[in-house]
Image: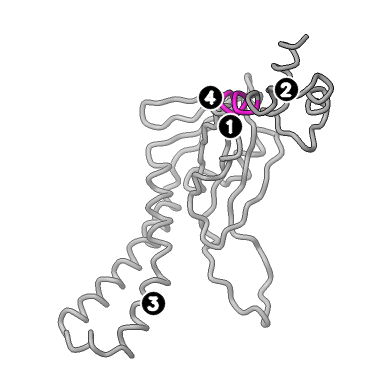
């Protein structure tokens, strides 16, 4: 099974980008042709607010297109792995290497007269897969529905809801690379160096209070003591 760029989606995304840009041009052109309008705050303030309101689709469309242009995703049934190609680069994602998966979209909620209409963009959504060493892979709905790729991997995922689902490269920052993990271990080895064997064993057994790297530091120190 192979997923490539969906041209119907690309057309919609391009329209979402081009139409607001044309509106921007029309508004700016109007102020250039009639400079006296720049001193009229009754015209300027609503125009600026309107321009800001229609801006998110421009950013979303461009970032999604840049992310998935010249990209393909293929599922290999024989190895139960996902192969992502971006230009000349190829990445093979095995299920054992995945440490987290996310579906980012706009939460579907019924219209409420009390809350009013929500400012959101539900036609933008994507999947995020994080593997070891905190390598992130984004698959937007320009290629396929996020749920399709996540179901192929047959693993649990977390839903994240944004009204403006921008590609967020900060998701998963809590997962440490090997270098970051080892650095944390060294820091906690220095902090625990005067602890007794009993205290170190207490740290190792307390998963709720202590992180993996702090417990690894305790293991290292205990090993040195014994």
Label 2 belongs to which residue?
A: 218
Prevalent SS, magenta region:
helix
* Mark 3 element type: helix
Q: CA distance from mark 1 to mark 4?
A: 8 Å
**Foreground disc of the pair 4, 2:** 2
Label 4 belongs to which residue?
A: 179
Please report contact status of discs 1 and 2: CB closer than 8 Å, yes or no.
no
Label 3 belongs to which residue?
A: 50
Quadrant of the rendering where the C terminus is positioned: top right
Q: Residue 43 occupies which quadrant of the picture?
A: bottom left
Asked if residue 109 is positioned above or below residue 173 in the image, the reply reads: below
Label 1 belongs to which residue?
A: 176
Lower position in the chain sequence, tag 1 or tag 2: 1
**Foreground disc of the pair 3, 4:** 4
* Mark 1 element type: loop
Q: CA distance from mark 4 to mark 2?
A: 18 Å
> Measuring 63% from the left and 52% from the top, which residue is drawn there?
160
**Foreground disc of the pair 3, 2:** 2
> Measuring 65% from the left and 63% from the top, which residue is drawn there?
108
């Amino acid at each position: 099974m192979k997923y490539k760029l969906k041209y119907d989606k690309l057309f919609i995304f391009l329209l979402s980008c081009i139409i607001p840009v044309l509106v921007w041009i029309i508004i700016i052109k109007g102020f250039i042709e009639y400079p006296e309008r720049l001193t009229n705050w009754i015209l300027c303030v609503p125009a600026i607010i309107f321009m800001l309101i229609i801006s998110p689709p421009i950013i979303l469309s461009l970032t999604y297109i840049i992310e998935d242009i010249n990209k393909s995703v293929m599922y290999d049934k024989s190895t139960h792995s996902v192969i992502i190609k971006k230009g000349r680069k190829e990445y093979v994602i095995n299920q054992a290497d995945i440490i987290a998966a996310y579906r980012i979209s706009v939460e579907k909620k019924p219209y409420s007269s009390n809350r009013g209409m929500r400012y959101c963009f539900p036609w933008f959504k994507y999947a995020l897969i994080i593997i070891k060493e905190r390598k992130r892979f984004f698959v937007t709905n320009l290629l396929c529905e996020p749920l399709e790729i996540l179901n192929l991997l047959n693993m649990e995922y977390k839903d994240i809801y944004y009204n403006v689902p921008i590609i967020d490269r900060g998701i998963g920052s809590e997962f440490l690379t090997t270098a970051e993990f080892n650095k944390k271990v060294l820091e906690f080895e220095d902090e625990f160096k005067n602890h007794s064997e009993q205290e170190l064993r207490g740290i190792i057994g307390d998963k709720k209070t202590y992180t993996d790297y702090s417990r690894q530091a305790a293991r290292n120190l205990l090993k040195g003591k014994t």
